[in-house]
Image (cartoon, helix red, strand yellow):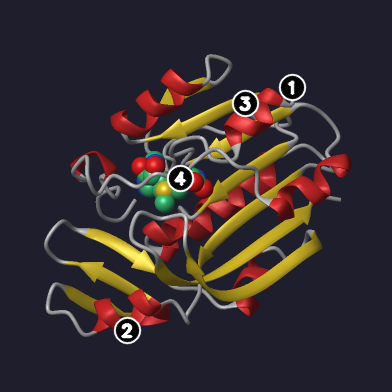
Amino acid sequence: MIGNPVNYDKKSKENFPIFPANLDLELKRYLNLVPGKEVLDLGIGQGRNSIPLAKLGFNVTGVDYSTKCLEVCKNTCNKLNLVQSDIRTFDIEKDKYDIILSGYVLHFLHKNDSHQLIKNIKNNIKNNGIVYISVFSLEDPRFIKHSTSSNFEILDNNILHNKIDDTYVSFFSKEEILSLFSDFKTLLISDSYCLEQKRQTPQYAGVIKYIGQKL
Ligand SMILES: C[S@@+](CC[C@H](N)C(=O)[O-])C[C@H]1O[C@@H](n2cnc3c(N)ncnc32)[C@H](O)[C@@H]1O
């Protein structure tokens, strides 16, 4: 493992992001292909996707490092199985999960760690299971912003190291994500640049979304 996990507990109350529970339309569209009811959400945050999934009858295990995020999940929905852990060390039980999701999380890891985690996800998800991930793209404005900040050092493969807190942020291309999942059936790949208005302070984001199925 390289560096520290990003610490959402350090965000002040005012800045604490509110990601209201709201199932992503992309995921909703493919739920009919999911073979069973077991969901693993790596970096569950405030349960944006997992709370709606639990309400639809899925058994959700949510993993997160942040005490504050897990508290929000616990107080909002009593059906979630919550685990406080670094997702890089969480042991994914083999052939248990029908959906593994990780929304807006894997870019907070050094790519050695995110690539290893993707391998673990692919090895351990059930056959016909669905993987759903979203990550920052190279178009994301934070790439330029951080690259020009003295707090960050620029590493190979579009990885930035935050020297202040020893965390990483990585930016991905669509081709890179497709190559990491070359042995899966691609159901959806999108590369968008949009204004995220649900945030307290709307900001532009470049995001790659991927949905794939293990065959
Ligand atoms: C931007 S939020 C996304 C939350 C949620 N997945 C969503 O789509 O709304 C990122 C979440 O990932 C968690 N996270 C980031 N790195 C982590 C790590 N190494 N281990 C566990 N959780 C991590 C943070 O604590 C935070 O809750």
| N-terminal-most mark, 3 or 2 | 3
Q: Does the residue labelled 4 lie within 8 Å of ligand 1?
A: yes
Under mark 2, the amino acid is Ile
146 or 74, which lies in front? 74
Q: Where is residue 113 in the image (x, y as percent from the top left)?
A: 43, 56
Instruction: Please name which of the two marks, 1 or 4, marks the residue nearer to the observer.
Output: 4
From the image, tell me which residue sits under label 1: 57
Query: In this view of the protein, can residue 102 be seen by the observer?
Result: yes
Residue 103 against residue 156 in the figure, above or below: above
Instruction: Please name which of the two marks, 4 or 2, marks the residue nearer to the observer.
Output: 4
From the image, tell me which residue sits under label 2: 144
- Residue at the spot 68% in from the left edge and 24% down from the top edge: 55
Instruction: Please name which of the two marks, 1 or 3, marks the residue nearer to the observer.
Output: 1
| N-terminal-most mark, 1 or 4 | 4
Q: How far apart are marks 1 and 4 (CA)?
A: 21 Å
Query: In this view of the protein, can residue 96 be seen by the observer?
Result: no
Mark 1 residue crowding within 10 angstroms, few (<14) / some (14–19) / many (20+)? few
114 or 138, which lies in front? 138
User: Where, by quadrant of the figure, is residue 159 drawn?
Assistant: bottom left
